[in-house]
Each structure stands twice: as structure tokens, then as C-alpha cells.
């Protein structure tokens, strides 16, 4: 429920405020898309932390560029080839 609240909050910003500011984003994905993806991937606390950390980089002295949300370590899978088999 809290997660949904923050996602709605960011999406409201995307539809109501962002169009008024114009296309000035220096990153891909945009900070609002980054925040949504981070919240969905990591949950509310870490997602907001990552999103705010990203917003702190949004200033004229940062070059911007491609800055994807980091992968979640909980989604990495170990391959069966990593295991040593004893015959």
C-alpha cells in the first residue's frame, strides 16, 4: 500500500508537472522513470534512496548519460554449472 502510494506520487509528477518543465533531462532513463523502477525493484526505502541519490546528480556540472537502476542481487541465479559434481 505504501509502495503504491509512492508510485502514484511519482506518476502524478510525470503527468502533471513534468510536461510543464519541458524535456531537460540529462539522464536516461529520466529521474522519475528511474525512481519508479527502483521502487518496483528494491522496495520503498531503498528505491527512494536510489532515486534521491540519482536526483542529487542532476545538476549542470554532471555530464548525465545512461544510468540504469542497478540489478537486484536477489534476482541473480546460480547456474548448475557453478556446482562441482562428484562422480
Image: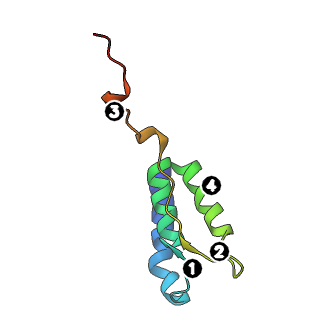
Look at mark 4 in the image and give the residue it sits on. 49
- Numbered badge on residue 26: 1
Spatial CA span between label 3 and label 4: 31 Å
Where 66 falls versus 36 (above or below)?
below
Look at mark 2 in the image and give the residue it sits on. 58
* N-term mark: 3 or 4: 4
Residue at (47% x, 62% y) in the render: 36
Nearer to the camera, 6 or 41: 41
Residue 43: percent from the left, percent from the top? 50, 48
Residue 42: percent from the left, percent from the top? 50, 48
CB atoms of marks 2 and 1 within 8 Å: yes
CB atoms of marks 2 and 3 within 8 Å: no
Of the two numbered discs 2 and 4 in the rendering, the one whose residue sits closer to the viewer:
2
Residue that protrudes farthest toward the top in the picture: 87
Of the two numbered discs 3 and 1 in the rendering, the one whose residue sits closer to the viewer:
3
Residue 61 occupies which quadrant of the picture? bottom right
Amino acid at each position: 500500500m505504501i509502495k503504491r502510494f509512492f508510485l502514484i506520487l511519482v506518476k502524478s509528477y510525470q503527468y502533471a508537472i513534468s510536461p510543464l518543465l519541458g524535456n531537460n533531462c540529462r539522464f536516461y532513463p529520466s529521474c522519475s522513470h528511474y525512481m519508479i523502477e527502483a521502487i518496483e525493484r528494491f522496495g520503498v526505502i531503498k528505491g527512494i534512496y536510489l532515486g534521491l541519490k540519482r536526483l542529487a546528480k542532476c545538476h549542470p556540472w554532471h555530464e548525465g548519460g545512461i544510468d540504469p537502476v542497478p540489478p537486484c542481487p536477489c534476482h541473480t541465479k546460480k547456474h548448475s554449472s557453478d556446482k562441482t559434481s562428484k562422480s
